[in-house]
Amino acid sequence: MWFTCKIKFNKVSEEGLMTKVQETYLLDALSFTEAEARFLEEMAPFMNDEFEITDIKKTRVSELFTSVDSLADKWYKAVVALITLDEKSGKEKRTNCPMYVQAANITDALHNLHAGMQGSLSDYVVVSLAETPILDVYPVKLDTETNENPA
């Protein structure tokens, strides 16, 4: 399961003023409890001051396409309709799937989405593509020896 987690904390602005900011992250976890614990673990090294987790909610993610491009600092949410044929009626059926794509801009996001979908056996249509407030994504960490979640 994936969770969208929001955190609020004080940050020094470019003008040197202390301002309260809220940031959004996407995290892979088995439950709300694990999501909160993992999020605290991921955020603690970056926080010098007090911070507050303001929201944790389940987020549907069908696919996640990361990028190795160092300029790919944004996350985009794509809704992709997978097209299948109903064998009984012969009608086309569309299933909307939310996918997240890392890219530098929306043009790159569309390119990365198509590149990630190349191996798909289904026909598909991109229904929507929009930038999200997500700053980073934390997939589950697997134990390299067993390929299992150590939690």
Image (spheres, grey):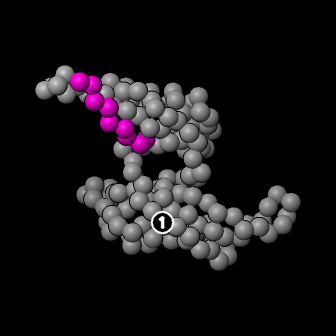
Q: Secondary structure at mark 1?
A: strand
Tell me what residue is drawn at x 41 percent, y 42 percent: 98
Let me know if residue 95 is in the magenta part.
yes
Q: Amino acid at mark 1?
A: Ile
How far across and how far down the image is residue 81, in percent?
37, 32
How far across and how far down the image is residue 5, in percent?
51, 62
Q: Which residue is mark 1?
A: 56
- Asked whether, in this view, residue 120 is left or right of residue 39, the answer is left
Does residue 55 lie above or below 105 as drawn? below
**Quarter of the rendering containing residue 43:** bottom right
Does residue 125 lie above or below 133 as drawn? above
Furthest toward the bottom, the residue is 50
Where's the C terminus, which quadrant? bottom left
Prevailing SS of the magenta stretch = strand
- How crowded pointer 1 is (Cα within 10 Å; few <14, some 14-19, many 20+) is rated as many
Let me know if residue 46 is in the magenta part.
no
Tell me what residue is drawn at x 41 percent, y 27 percent: 125
Depth check: give the residue in front, 76 or 136: 76
Where's the N terminus, which quadrant? bottom left
Q: Is residue 137 visible?
A: yes
Q: Is residue 70 visible?
A: no
Furthest toward the front, the residue is 89
Q: Which residues are magenta?
A: 91-99
Tell me what residue is drawn at x 39 percent, y 51 percent: 60
How far across and how far down the image is residue 18, in percent?
79, 69
